[in-house]
Image (cartoon, grey):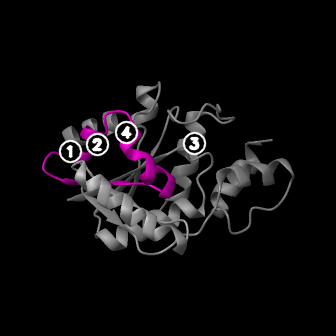
Amino acid sequence: MRIAMFGGSFDPIHNGHISLAHAFTDKLKLDKVLIIPSYIPPHKLRHSAVTPQQKLDMCRLAFENETKYEVSDIEIKRRGASYTYMTLEELSDIYKGDKLFLITGADMFMTIHEWKKPEIIFSLATVCGVPRNNDDIDSLKKRADYLQTLGAETEILDAGIMTVSSTEIRNKIKNNEPLTGLVPLSVERYIIENELYK
C-alpha cells in the first residue's frame, strides 16, 4: 500500500490542509492518508488553547465519510514534543512493506534537513512538498535537488494550494468574523459549540 503521513498542529484544521491532502492523494495515488495532530510541535512554543482531544475531534469531523483518510492519535498518545522521525519509525513498524510518504507544506519542506534526525526521515519516507504559490515552485525544486544529495526521495506538487492560515482563523474567531470557506461547516459548528479560541 501507498500510505502518507500528514502531521501538523491542526489548530484548527482548515480547508487548506484538506485540499493539500486531496491533491497529494490524487498525484501519488495514495491508498491511505494518516492525519496526525501533534501533541506539541517542536518548532512552535505557543501552547494551544484547545485540548489534544479537541484537535482530534476537529480532524475527524473534517474527514468524516472519506474512507482513505484516517485520523491518528499516535503523537498525542506519546505526549511530549512530536518528532517526525519517531512517528515514522512507529509507522514503518505498523505498515511493514508499505511505501510511506511524508506530506509537508512549503515552509516545512524547505527546512526538513534541519529537523531532528533527518537521515531517519529520509530513509523511511518520500518527502513531499507543495508551493504556497507559483513563485515558490523553483525554490522548492532546488531544495528537492539538495535533499536528494542527502539521500531523500522527494515529490513536488506542481500547483499552489489554497492558502489558509490557522492564525488567521483564530483571529477571525476572536473578532467574531465568519469562517465561511475557511473550514468545513462541521468544524465551524464544533468551534462555536465548544467556544474554542475565544
Q: Of the two numbered discs 2 and 3 on the same chain, state the one appearing first in sequence.
A: 3
Residue type pointed to by label 4: Thr
- Closest to the camera, between mark 1 and mark 4, is 1
Q: Of the two numbered discs 1 and 3 on the same chain, state the one appearing first in sequence.
A: 3
Classify mark 3: helix, strand or loop: helix
Q: CA distance from mark 3 to mark 4?
A: 18 Å
Point 65% across, 35% down: residue: 48
For the residue pair 181 and 100, the one nearer the viewer reads as 100
Instruction: Please name the residue that numbered disc 4 is placed on.
Output: 84
User: Along the horizontal axis of the image, is 147 left or right of 94?
Assistant: right
Q: CA distance from mark 2 to mark 3?
A: 25 Å
Instruction: Please name the residue that numbered disc 2 is placed on.
Output: 121
Instruction: Please name the residue that numbered disc 3 is placed on.
Output: 55
Mark 2 and mark 4 in contact? Answer it, CB < 8 Å: yes
Residue 123: mark = 1
Residue type pointed to by label 2: Ile
